Image (tube, rainbow, N blue to C red):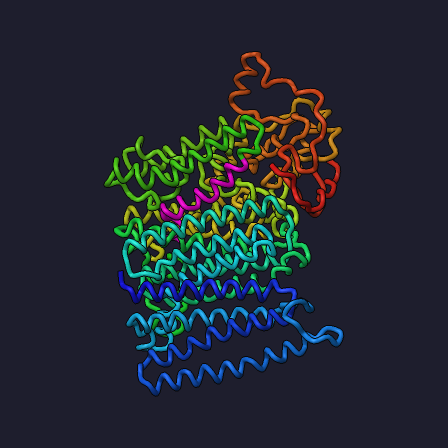
Amino acid sequence: MNVDLLLFAIVAAAMTCVSAFLIQAAVESRARARSWVALYLLAMMGEMWISVVVYLSSPTVSRLVAGLAVSSFLMVLTVLPVLAGLARSRSRGSPATLVEDVPVRFGGGLASLLAATLLVNEFLMSWGLQLATGTVPFGGSALAGFVAVVNSPWFLFTMAGEMALTAVLIRRRIPRPLFAFLVVQSGIMALSPPALVSPLWTQVAIYGSSVLMIGLFVYLFEYLYRHRQFPSAFGSYLVALVSVYGLMMVGTFVWQYFGDGTTFAVSVVLEMVVVYLAVARPALFQDSPALPWQLRPGWTTALLSGVFVAELGMGAVLSVQLDPADYLGAFLFLPLAGPPGTVLLNALSNGFWFFATAAASSWFLIMMGAEMGALVVFKFRETKNLENRVRLLLMMGCYAAFAVFYPSIYFALVFPNAPNPATVPVLGWPMGIGSYPLAAGVFGTVLLTYVVLGVLTAFFGRRVVCSVFCTAPLMYQGTAIDSMKSFNRTSPVARKYLSSRFSAAYSLTLGLVTVALVGTSLLSYLDSTGAANVYIQGNDPSVFFFVASFSVAWYVLFVAIPYAGNYNCVTMGWCYTGILSGAIQKIGTFKLKVRDRQVCRDCTTVDCAKGCPVGLVDMPGHFRATGEFRSTKCCGVGDCVEDCPYDNLYVSDIRHTVRRLLGRPETRPRATGHTPQPRGGARGRPTVSAVPFTLEEGAVPLPMVGSAVEPSPA
């Protein structure tokens, strides 16, 4: 082992430990004077490294003298604000002491000073150690030198260690969730792919950081589900953190694909700013006003946007790393040169196709399946209704089969010459009901897809697609995302799509999607016969429509849940597969029924309507009037059945129809002695205040849901 390298590593570790203890002293001290002294010592550490950098840049006696002179001058200069701070620390005329005094109050300015000092210290130390090991980071441009210093192991590893040790030292002063985030952040920082020039390290870092980030996002979403309100300072920290992680994953992809580490380096610096601003003001996370996130659509959208950008970048990185033969050339980027109009169009095209390609990649879907699937598992544990539990298992199995196994493994092995599923016109098999193994060609695939879709929907309802086969339900029905259905009733946009009736907004969306489907399918057919030659950026029109709808628009609207409402592919009617299955459901056997209409007439909580993820608020009125409910919008999730506190509601489909034709009872009698459940519903899920709305079909107004409170443990 290189003795010098080991010695430098010991120096870096010692600096890390000293910095962490000084941070603790600065933010936890009961004496303002001690806090100022700790800040001064932190500044001195950076000023000492200035002399090292000056000398090692050109090791001569004159440079050594110059470096020591600069460091000494800065140390003296730094004493002045410290003395001023000590002077202000007098309490009622008593002299300031280092033992007990008025505690320092870290405002935004002082916290920023602490963060800047620590960043400069780490930067100078990394620069100095690189020079000591023979690397000259600033041999070229200033930007290249900055990137080389920040992306070095001396910077990344020491910062990761400093974060972790600081979090441990001040763990009693910060909330447990913040401590968990800081620890995981340090792990992700330590697993930075650009830190070491080694293919093995790159693999380990990408896989390890991806696993940690997935775990972090699962923890984040479950925290949101369990805590419907928390200090606003913690909410601001979360939005800043996920935004930085979005930039970091994009930066990792740019570094991996183009060899440019600038974006990654910027994200690292921003992450450190977020961390140190949080560490410097631990009391703020206890004392700031409460943030009821279900009543803050802007905050929730910002959080979802940051998480999704990070997931998209992570999916692209994993795809290139694990399947370079397919994805190294899949991300086609047009040059950003020429007239401004050309640059703008090329930039938009690059963004669109990067988005679409990454979102359609198998590794992105695997990563999203692991993340959102964990939330579904949490929901499964809370679900009591057996039929709903079975459906959740089928849904997870279908996602694994149709989003991962069939397109990525099965077809590549069994049908190596088969066309890419996304290139099959109109529907094809990407929606999870494909029939390629049964068909002779593309036309047969499309035809059998419609047949399978029609038969299964007629028997079991739209839930075959919208709650089982499609990849969307796995992402909509996890605990945290499912709880966002409250936005269906609070968002001005989402409220236009409430109830089973076709509002003007719904009819317009449905009409536009239908025209687009028919138009692109017709153009696709004419192109195939040679009667036309219409392609969109080299793509078949129907394929482009499919990509734009389900690889781009779906995710944009997923992020926009706080404004568009949950399950908006169903509520708004823009998913053409859902439109087709909804039309068939209207004449099929699927419906919702009640065992006793009088129970619904006596009900004042209408939990079934509140639990509906697609906002069918007129459901209770139909139950009271006819004892059953049928709607083309109902996607059979079953939350209404689960949330009914009287066990009075059930799903009726072909199984019950057959039983009725055989003269048997459709289902068991309603259990007696049921009483209304707590405000969380049948699963004890927490709720939040929502805007009241009026039920249709003669129903009563829906009362306000209970105020946002901490839920009882699941």
Residue 613 occupies quadrant: top right
Left or right of residue 664: residue 126: left
Foreground residue, 251 or 455?
Answer: 251
Secondary structure mainly formed by the magenta segment: helix
The magenta stretch is: 356-379
Foreground residue, 430 or 233?
Answer: 233
Q: Position of residue 131 (x, y in %)?
A: 32, 73
Residue 626 lies within the magenta run: no
Q: Position of residue 167 (x, y in %)?
A: 52, 57
Residue 252 occupies quadrant: bottom left
Compared to residue 519, the image places residue 114 above or below, namely below
Left or right of residue 494: residue 443: left
Tell me what residue is drawn at x 57 percent, y 72 percent.
37
Q: Position of residue 679 (x, y in %)?
A: 70, 37
User: Residue at the top extreme?
Assistant: 663
Tell me what residue is drawn at x 49 percent, y 40 percent.
473
Residue 302 can be seen in this image: no
Residue 373 lies within the magenta run: yes
Residue 335 can be seen in this image: yes
